[in-house]
Image (cartoon, rainbow, N blue to C red):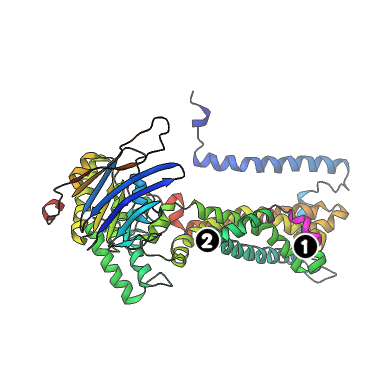
């Protein structure tokens, strides 16, 4: 008998195995939903798939009577817009500061402890401050995500710069490189894939801050909607929205991974000879 | 012409004396090989030449001028590992030195200047036997190919002095003969001065025009850090300063 650590599934069974937990969850849901609905046809906790489908259809393909909007797509776009703006700002600021702190010892001495301290502030604790200072509008929600995500990207990237072998930096100097040239030809190109990794890791917290901000003060958005309909125990809305949020997050992660593999082939293991 | 002069050089880190009273005069186009036990200051000596360590006392002069306090294009370096740029392929690694010096702001060359840099890089690539691998990334190369590229990358900048820090230490013994032929060829081609730290005594006699042995002359068993190493032997060798055509074949 071989050791368990040496028994690997083949490709086909790996796919089947990865589908298994999803299938188990789905079947368990069907079973308990059915059991509850048999007992009480008015049960709202585990709605039947058909109920979910018709609610979702109404949200996605029928205009809302009051606002005249397609709520599902309107919410999706509102949330994605906030998230993408915030992630774009965070990534740019993170790259700029991470690079500068990693490369320049003077800036590192000045800013690294400050960034470390700022990154420990719980972002949700400053949300009231944001609402007071910038109001309840879009800016507060976007700023919350930026405050939550940027310090982590800055710290990660500045550490990554430090991980570049010292030999490389010395070699570049013996090839005549100035500080600026070392930044643009040696450090920055090697930092792009690290930035993508850092963004992938911060996607989870970005969504967390987005939904928290939307739950508290918003008039549209995925997080706003699920907290709104919670009052009516509308699980037929909440469940598909949660699944949709998960799918969006997964898609963004997948796109970033694809970008990394396509654009920075030198950094991924598959390109090895 | 490159003259390296060291006069009464001392180097200590706190209470630990690493080098003491080192005196040396090296003329133009020499191939200096440096051997010695571990911790005898060989690498510290090389780091001072490179400009990342500075002498505690004494003089360290190149052509009569004190060493700059940071690395520069007149002194090339080949480390044992990690001196290639993983995000650039072979030809880009080789052209980097030319691009950095040709374009101060962009660090990249375009158009005719790029083509001329490329043809120069192609020539050198041919000389180090890597023509077939121009589009590969460093991680796809064997250890020996990486070191060939790293040497070529330094040589393309035509440094006055080339520093080699155990460049063949991590390589398969079977390919060191090729590497020796290559380094002698480039040394004669560019007429530079080479300082090579090595663990291989045979290699140091084989390649050098001058062999330096670093060792401690005084040892205090109560406090081993009290005395540093110095050059205990400075042996002129025959070397291979002749045209290397028959060797490179």
Disc 2 on helix, strand or loop? loop
Q: Which mark is residue A113?
A: none
Residue B193 located left or right of residue A110: left
Q: Is residue B157 left or right of residue A198?
A: left
Are discs 1 and 2 both within one chain?
Answer: yes
- Number of marks in the rendered image: 2
**Is residue A162 depicted above or below B91 in this figure?**
above
Q: Residue B246 in the image: state x and y as whole percent.
A: 11, 53
Residue A253 visible to the viewer: no
Residue beneath the point at 41% across and 37% down: B225
| Residue range corresponding to the magenta coloring | A118-128
Observer-nearest of B14 and A196: B14
| Residue receiving disc 1 | A59
Q: Quadrant of residue A16?
A: top right
Q: Residues within 10 Å of mark 1 (few under 14, many from 20)?
A: some
Q: Secondary structure at mark 1?
A: helix
Viewer-closest of A110 and A50: A110
Q: What secondary structure do most residues of the magenta stretch adopt?
A: helix
Q: Is residue B108 left or right of residue A255?
A: left
Q: Which residue is mark 2?
A: A104
Where is residue B97 shown, x and y percent of the image?
A: 34, 64
| Place of residue B221 in the rendered image (x, y in percent of width and height, measured from the top left) | 39, 30
Based on the displayed image, in which of its 4 quarters is residue A244 positioned? bottom right
């Amino acid at each position: 008998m071989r050791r368990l650590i040496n028994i690997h599934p083949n490709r086909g069974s790996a796919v089947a195995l990865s589908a298994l937990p999803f299938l188990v969850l789905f079947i368990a849901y069907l079973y308990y939903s059915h059991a509850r609905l048999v007992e009480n046809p008015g049960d709202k906790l585990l709605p039947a798939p058909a109920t979910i489908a018709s609610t979702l259809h109404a949200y996605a393909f029928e205009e809302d009577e009051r606002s005249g909007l397609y709520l599902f797509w309107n919410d999706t776009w509102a949330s994605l817009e906030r998230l993408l703006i915030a992630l774009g700002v965070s990534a740019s600021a993170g790259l700029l500061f991470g690079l500068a702190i990693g490369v320049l010892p003077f800036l590192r001495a000045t800013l690294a402890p400050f960034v470390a301290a700022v990154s420990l502030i719980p972002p949700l604790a400053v949300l009231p401050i944001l609402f007071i200072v910038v109001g309840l509008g879009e800016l507060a929600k976007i700023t919350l995500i930026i405050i939550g995500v940027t310090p982590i990207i800055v710290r990660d990237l500045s550490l990554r710069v430090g991980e570049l072998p010292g030999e490389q930096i010395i070699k570049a100097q013996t090839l005549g490189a100035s500080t600026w040239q070392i930044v643009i030809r040696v450090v920055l190109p090697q930092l792009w894939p690290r930035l993508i990794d850092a963004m992938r890791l911060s996607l989870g917290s970005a969504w967390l801050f987005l939904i928290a901000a939307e739950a508290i003060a918003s008039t549209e958005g995925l997080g706003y909607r699920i907290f709104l309909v919670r009052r009516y125990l509308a699980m037929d809305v909440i469940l598909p929205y949660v699944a949709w949020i998960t799918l969006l997050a997964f898609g963004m992660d997948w796109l970033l991974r694809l970008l990394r593999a396509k654009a920075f082939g030198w950094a991924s293991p598959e390109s090895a000879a | 012409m490159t003259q390296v002069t060291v006069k009464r050089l001392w180097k200590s880190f706190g209470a630990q004396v690493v080098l003491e009273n080192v005196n040396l005069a090296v003329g133009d186009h020499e191939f200096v090989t440096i051997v010695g036990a571990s911790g005898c200051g060989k690498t510290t000596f090389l780091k001072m030449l490179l400009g990342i360590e500075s002498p505690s006392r004494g003089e360290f002069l190149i052509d009569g001028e004190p060493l700059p306090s940071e690395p520069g294009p007149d002194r090339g370096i080949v480390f044992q590992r990690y001196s290639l740029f993983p995000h650039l392929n072979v030809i880009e690694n080789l052209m980097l030195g030319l691009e950095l010096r040709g374009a101060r702001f962009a660090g990249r060359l375009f158009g005719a200047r790029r083509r001329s840099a490329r043809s120069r890089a192609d020539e050198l690539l041919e000389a180090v036997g890597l023509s077939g691998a121009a589009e590969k990334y460093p991680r796809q190369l064997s250890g020996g190919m990486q070191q060939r590229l790293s040497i070529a990358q330094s040589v393309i900048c035509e440094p006055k002095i080339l520093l080699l820090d155990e460049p063949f230490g991590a390589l398969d013994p079977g390919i060191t003969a090729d590497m020796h032929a290559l380094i002698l060829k480039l040394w004669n081609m560019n007429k530079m001065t080479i300082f090579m730290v090595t663990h291989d005594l045979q290699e140091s006699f084989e390649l050098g025009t001058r062999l330096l042995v670093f060792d401690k002359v005084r040892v205090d068993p109560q406090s081993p850090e009290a005395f540093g190493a110095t050059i205990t032997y400075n042996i002129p060798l025959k070397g291979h300063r002749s045209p290397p055509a028959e060797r490179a074949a």
